[in-house]
Image (spheres, rainbow, N blue to C red):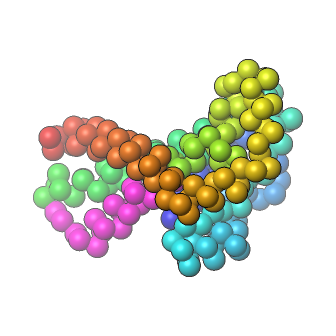
Amino acid sequence: MLLAITIHEYAHGRVAYHFGDPTAKYQGRLSLNPLRHLDPLGTAALLLFGFGWAKPVPINPYNFRDFRSGMLWVSLAGPLANFALALVSLFLLFLPARLGFYWPGYAQFVNILVIYNVLLGVFNLIPIPPLDGSKILAALLPEGAAALLRQIEPYAPVLLMVLIFSGAVRWLVWPLYSAIRQGMQAVVLLLLGLT
């Protein structure tokens, strides 16, 4: 989970920098060092409940050369980075089989890496603030509709907690997780000639 969160936050900062916002760089957050991204409360929740969060990378969208495009790509960067790491991890998961080896501990670790990265990517695409999905949606919507979305922001964390603790979020995440995982796995198996 620590690797997944670190890659996610780093990607936000790196893409923001690409679009003209140096805020993350100036605050030392353009780093793959997990310690730079840990949030004390989020880390405690991760250890206690198996679900946590990182410090959001600081971004100033007014530095973007193109505000709407910058917000869209910076918001997409985290989930896309998680999906990319999941794809690489799937390749590393099945490569030993292609070479005729099987290491149970290695396979278990890499499989968990796949699971966490796909889950984190999918979860963050839920269009409820403060998740990335809400920012992606706001960047795609006309200004009036985006303003309406911003009005629910103060209530969104409570809504998100209700969805998580009621188990309703599973109905959203698991079907997408399964579809994305199966699609990625099919591509990797095809590339490795294991189909």
Task: Write the residue at 15% across / 44% down.
Answer: 194
**Residue 150 picture location, percent across and down:** 79, 38
Is residue 105 magenta-colored?
A: yes
The answer to whether any part of residue 33 appears in the image is no
Asked whether, in this view, residue 46 is left or right of residue 111, the answer is right
Above/below status of 42 relative to 150: below
Rendered location of residue 146, percent (x, y) = 75, 29
Residue at the (38%, 45%) spot, across then down: 175
Residue positioned most to the top: 142
Q: Is residue 32 left or right of residue 69?
A: left
| Quadrant location of the C terminus in the rendered image | top left
Location of residue 70 (image quadrant)? top right
Closer-to-camera residue (35/176): 176
Is residue 102 in the magenta section?
Answer: yes
Residue displayed at 56% across by 79% down: 48
| Nearest to the observer: residue 177 or residue 155 | 155
| Bounds of the magenta segment | 101-120
Q: Is residue 137 visible?
A: yes
